[in-house]
């Protein structure tokens, strides 16, 4: 399934985004050659894509397993209250827990889904018991532990742009 993108992008812009999603370190010269433009127009398009917010930035994709962070758990969090005040307080506080890799507000049987990465179950248990359970308005949590990551391709969205 292709990722929906703004209607103001043409084929060259889409090619630039796809190429950079595959290799964000390539030079403008290499990028221009890959997408079929000369260097100056490619650089202008690149700068516009950044200025228009299609490119948030560039970063290295780290290997969590090599860093000893291969324990992944998903915590379902139910709040005692879902008023705007409660949601704001939870959102602000959860951002301070470095082990929380992702936090999504959910429409369903619980309020938030957190992806938590730790070195092992012992550290996860501490984070859950001492940090997540202590967040504002938390009523209950439920944990699902990932046994294996089968697909993790957001960092390489080739084929979804366009």
Image (cartoon, helix red, strand yellow):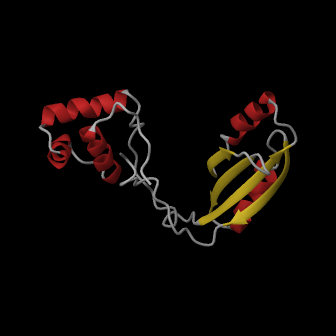
Residue drawn at point x = 63 percent, y = 63 percent: 72
Residue 96 image offset from top left, x and y in percent: 67, 40
Query: Looking at the image, is 16 positioned above or below residue 114?
Result: above
Quarter-of-image position of residue 138: top right
Q: Residue furthest bottom?
A: 147
**Is 90 drawn above or below residue 154 in the view shown?**
above
Asked whether the viewer can see residue 24, the reply is no
1 left or right of 113?
left
Side of 94 relative to 52 (left or right): right
Q: Is residue 22 visible?
A: yes
Relative horizontal placement of residue 110, taking residue 148 as reference (left or right): right
Q: Residue at x 81, y 39 (%)?
A: 136
Q: How many marks?
A: 0
Residue 23 in picture, x, y percent from top left? 30, 52
39 displayed left or right of 66: left
**Residue located at (37% from left, 47% from top):** 161
Q: 66 or 141: nearer the eye?
A: 141
Residue 24 percent across, percent down from the top left = 31, 47
Quarter of the rendering occupied by the C terminus? top left
Above or below residue 93? Residue 70 is below
Image quadrant holding the N terminus, namely: bottom left
Residue 2 place in picture, x, y as percent: 42, 51
Q: Nearer the viewer, residue 65 or 72?
A: 72
Residue that protrudes farthest toward the left in the picture = 38
The correct choice, above or below, for 24 with respect to 69 in the image is above
């Amino acid at each position: 399934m292709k990722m929906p993108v703004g209607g103001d992008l043409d084929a060259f812009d889409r090619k630039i985004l796809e190429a950079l999603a595959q290799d964000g370190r390539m030079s403008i010269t290499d990028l221009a050659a890959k997408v079929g433009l000369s260097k100056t127009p490619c650089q202008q398009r690149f700068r516009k894509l950044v200025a228009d917010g299609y490119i948030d930035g560039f970063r290295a994709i780290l290997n969590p397993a090599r860093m000893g962070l291969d324990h992944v758990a998903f915590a379902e969090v139910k709040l005692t209250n879902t008023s705007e005040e409660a949601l704001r307080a939870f959102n602000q506080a959860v951002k301070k827990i470095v082990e929380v890799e992702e936090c999504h507000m959910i429409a369903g049987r619980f309020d938030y889904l957190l992806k938590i990465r730790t070195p092992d179950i012992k550290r996860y248990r501490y984070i859950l018991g001492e940090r997540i359970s202590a967040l504002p308005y938390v009523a209950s949590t439920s944990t699902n532990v990932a046994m294996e990551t089968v697909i993790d391709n957001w960092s390489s969205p080739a084929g979804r742009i366009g």
